[in-house]
Amino acid sequence: MFTAADMISEEVMKIFTNCAKFHGEDFDIDNVDGGTSEIAVDCDEDYLVGMAYVADCHTFVREVNLEKFDLERERAKMVDLFLQVLKFE
């Protein structure tokens, strides 16, 4: 098992750096208001679910509570959301 926190944070920082370069600016991590969230995952799918959980918390102004984070529950929520969009009869 590896910790995705460094990976998630690292990937986000790469995105910020590339966006800044595109706009001819320098990216400085000190200008980022938010912190990082550490979520232990085993694979890319779990990584995606973990990122979605953190994004969901920030979107709906909820605290990221990693002690209560349940990977299977969050995965089921994502599947339910996607199935709702398909509107099966």
Image (cartoon, grey):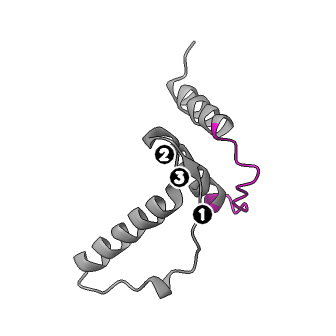
Q: Main secondary structure of the magenta part?
A: loop
Residue 39 horizontal side relative to residue 26, left or right: right
Quadrant of the rendered image containing residue 13 = bottom left
Residue 37 is marked as 1
User: What residue is shown with label 3?
Assistant: 51
Residue at x-position 28% and y-position 86%: 25
SS for dot 2: helix
Residue at x-position 58% and y-position 28%: 84
SS for dot 3: helix
SS for dot 1: loop
Residue 89: x percent and y percent?
A: 57, 12
**Mark 2 vs 1: CB contact within 8 A:** no
- Identity, as a three-letter code, of the amino acid under mark 3: Met
Comparing labels 1 and 3, the label whose residue is closer to the camera:
1
Residue 28: x percent and y percent?
A: 40, 86
Residue at x-position 73% and y-position 62%: 63
Question: In the image, which residues are magenta?
Answer: 58-71
**Mark 2 vs 3: CB contact within 8 A:** yes
Q: Crowding at label 2, few (<14), some or many (≥20) Cα neighbours within 10 Å?
A: some
Residue 48 is marked as 2
Looking at the picture, does residue 51 appear above or below residue 5? above
Which is more N-terminal, label 3 or label 1? 1
- Give the alpha-carbon distance from disc 2 to disc 1, as whole Å: 13 Å
**Mark 1 vs 3: CB contact within 8 A:** no
Residue 18 horizontal side relative to residue 78, left or right: left
Quadrant of the rendered image containing residue 39 = bottom right
Residue 43: x percent and y percent?
A: 46, 40
Residue reaching furthest to the right: 68
